[in-house]
Amino acid sequence: VFDDTIVDVPHPNPLFADMGVKVSQTVRSDKLSHFADHMRQFAPFSQQAIGAMFILNQKRCGLFYDMRAGKSHSSLLAYQIAKAQGKVDHLIIVCPKTILDVVWEPICNQQHVDAYAMVNGAAEDEIAMDQGYDAFLISFSSLWRRFGILERHLDLSRCFIILDETSK
């Protein structure tokens, strides 16, 4: 049994704590401690932290800095902070099929985000929506076939959506 607790603490990562980021909300203590443990293990580079903070302060935005500078990690970090603050419920990542399993699945695994790649048939994807996944990975080419499934199972207004690069 986990107690619901109201917390107002500095962010567990010193880089964000120095920026004044706080985790303040009613959370289950198990989720907060897991997030704090994770942030102590993953220290983002400065450009990743700056990117994440920029994302969190926008309704919609794009990150257009150099390849391999950490845009994906910045986006995922922003999602994790927003989720810990109770601002979003799920993550939807839409990207080219060519990077879905070689880029996003490993990043999600590394960052302890439980993700499901919507690459199976509609029936399997429909079942997966109720299995407790945090994130759903979808290719641009199959988004039109999966959109109805997402609408039926998720409150899209409470989803953090990442649209990744469309170039190959």
Image (tube, grey):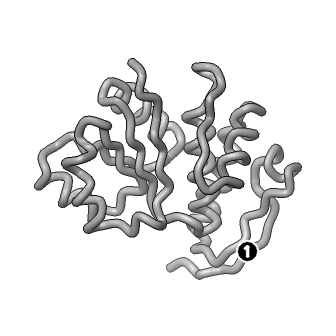
Q: Is residue 53 above or below residue 130?
A: above
Q: Which image quadrant for residue 93?
A: top left
Q: Which image quadrant for residue 41?
A: top right
Task: Write the residue at 73% across / 74% down.
Answer: 7
Residue 52 rendering spot, x and y as whole percentages: 68, 44
In the image shown, does 30 or 23 lie closer to the viewer?
A: 23
Whether residue 32 sits left or right of residue 125 in the image: it is right
Residue flagged by tag 1: what amino acid is it?
Answer: Val
Q: Secondary structure at mark 1?
A: strand
Q: Is residue 74 above or below residue 97?
A: below
Task: Write the residue at 65% across / 25% down.
Answer: 65
Q: Is residue 128 above or below residue 61?
A: below
Residue 18 rendering spot, x and y as whole percentages: 88, 49
Pointer 1 residue: 7
Whether residue 102 sits left or right of residue 19 in the image: it is left
Q: Is residue 116 above or below residue 24?
A: above
Task: Write the residue at 62% across / 49% down.
Answer: 78
Whether residue 77 sits left or right of residue 45 in the image: it is left
Residue 100 rendering spot, x and y as whole percentages: 35, 32
Residue 105 rendering spot, x and y as whole percentages: 39, 36
Q: Which image quadrant for residue 68?
A: top right
Q: In the displayed orientation, state which residue is furthest to the right.
A: 18
Whether residue 33 sits left or right of residue 113 in the image: it is right
Task: Write the residue at 66% across / 53% down.
Answer: 58
- Mark 1, other Cα within 10 Å: few <14 / some 14–19 / many ≥20: some
